[in-house]
Image (cartoon, rainbow, N blue to C red):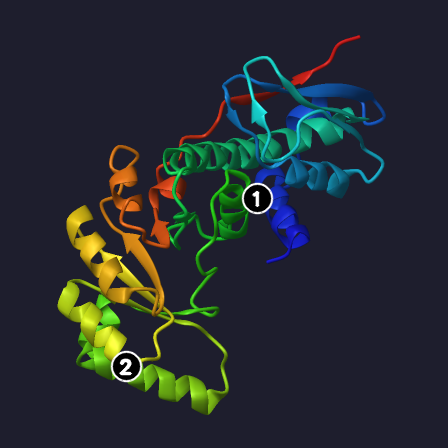
Amino acid sequence: MTDHQFIAAALAEDIGSGDYSTLASIDSSSRGKAILKIKEAGILAGVSLAKQIFHFLEPETNIIINKKDGDPVSIGDIAFEVEAKVHTILQAERLVLNCMQRMSGIATLTHQYVEKIKNYPTKILDTRKTTPLFRQYEKEAVRMGGGSNHRMGLYDMIMLKDNHIDFCGGIEKAILKTKKYLDEQKLNLKIEVETRNIEDVKKALSTGVVDRIMLDNYSPSDLKAAVSLIDGKCESEASGGITLDNIEDYAKSGVDYISVGAIIHHAVSLDLSLKAQLV
């Protein structure tokens, strides 16, 4: 979905047959100003999308940007000032706030995880545990918070998880069958496989075709042993049961990536408001 398609669909959902509150009380030719005010400290995200929303409704909208995507913000900061028709400001208000609050919450939580392991080479990854149709913006927010993106969907990377392996009849069979399929279809996709124990890691490595091994729900000590066994033969990724309190213990293993679904699905929206600027 393009930005234009998303904005059009989101505005259609909200405005429906008409913004009657605005139509009833504000003259259509009235112009006004508003400010995006920060009410909670964190990492700002969604400024670029907000700008597109205003310009979708009124291309001549004037926006003065004071804080960029990815900037740290404090209570009382003004992220941007907007000047447009009052109808434009009021119709865009809720969509702008919904998107920016959600994205800023994700960027803020991601930043907290990234800061916890800043002294290690391990990178924080997101997952596909996202809001339907809003995934591209949630993953963009992860990047703004200093994290990295895992695959966008089912189409841009192979991930053989426990259910794939069990349905296929074993980890080695699933990997080799997948490699054969990719070669036949001439698809240049990386192969990642989920493992549940050291024995699974040995089996995955024996195929010689895996690009990344996911170490799912390993203890920090078992993770260290698995990373040592992998020894750079492919990438390694830890996942499952990892929190802000224990993430450093996992990063100490030397694992390449740690995927944390919580940076998206447990993020709390950052408090922002769009206020009329009265002259």
Q: Amino acid at mark 2?
A: Thr
Compared with 245, 203 (above or below) is: below
Residue in the picture at 34% in, 42% down: 262
Tag 1's secondary structure?
helix
Q: Nearer the viewer, mark 2 or mark 1?
A: 2
**How far, Cα to Cα, is label 2 from label 1?**
50 Å
Residue 141 location (% of width, % of height): 52, 42
Q: Amino acid at mark 1?
A: Glu
Residue 172 location (% of width, % of height): 22, 80
Neighbourhood count class around disc 1 (C-alpha, 10 Å): few under 14, some 14–19, many 20 upward: few
Q: Nearer the viewer, residue 34 or 169?
A: 169
Judging by the rendered image, the residue that carries numbered circle 2 is 207
Judging by the rendered image, the residue that carries numbered circle 1 is 13
| Residue lying furthest top | 279
Q: Disc number at residue 46?
A: none
Residue in the picture at 55% in, 46% down: 140
Compared with 42, 14 (above or below) is: below
